[in-house]
Amino acid sequence: MTLAPPDYVVLVLAAGGVVTGLFIGLSGALAFFSGCLAASFAATFGWRFSESFLSSGLARGLAVALAALVAFWIARAIVRKTVKVALAQPGDSIFGAVAAGFSGFAVGIGLVWLAQFLGIPGAEGSSLLSEVLCHVG
């Protein structure tokens, strides 16, 4: 299998994910993901439900942003402490590197697929994308 330029982009993103995962660990990766999920839920429902009692768009936006930041911080703190208690330091870093490497690979494959779908020149011929699509569907 020969690697095309898009394949190198995927590999660089996966390697960057591994290095990042070594530093933040699995607890940091899971905490960030759960914090982002909680913030998006808070922003979605906060925007929908604040319409009845906040008429100003600016006040409504600031209130929703504050609620999203608080939800992000609370969810991140809870998950990070829980995973750090359950998983010791070397395991946390190793599992973090593996999880972040997989997520970097998945993001890279998604970007290459999107570039091919949009017809961006130079994005065709990815061996890694064809292998993934052969096994995934």
Image (cartoon, grey):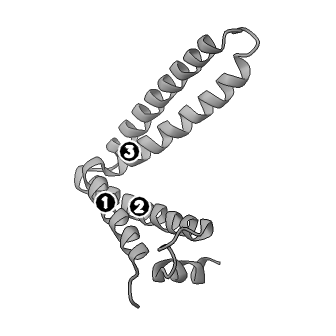
State the separation of the CA atoms marked 1 and 3. Answer: 23 Å
The residue where tag 1 is placed is 16
Crowd class of label 1 (few under 14; some 14 to 19; many from 20; radius 10 Å): some
Q: Which mark is residue 83?
A: 3
Front-most of 125 and 33? 125
Crowd class of label 2 (few under 14; some 14 to 19; many from 20; radius 10 Å): many
- 15 above or below 129? above
> Nearer the observer, disc 1 or disc 3?
1
The residue where tag 2 is placed is 104
Residue occupying the point 54% across, 82% down? 130
- 4 above or below 78? below
Q: Position of residue 20 (x, y in %)?
A: 29, 53
Q: Position of residue 29 (x, y in %)?
A: 39, 48
Q: Where, by quadrant of the figure, is residue 21 drawn?
A: bottom left
Q: Answer yes or no: do the residues labelled 1 and 2 have beta carbons within 8 Å?
A: yes
User: Which numbered disc, 1 or 2, marks the residue that appears first in the sequence?
Assistant: 1
Residue most extreme to the bottom: 1
Residue occupying the point 65% across, 78% down? 137
Three-letter amino acid code of the residue under disc 2? Gly
Front-most of 37 and 8? 8
Three-letter amino acid code of the residue under disc 3? Val
Q: Position of residue 92 (x, y in %)?
A: 30, 53
Q: Position of residue 31 (x, y in %)?
A: 42, 41
State the separation of the CA atoms marked 1 and 2. Answer: 7 Å
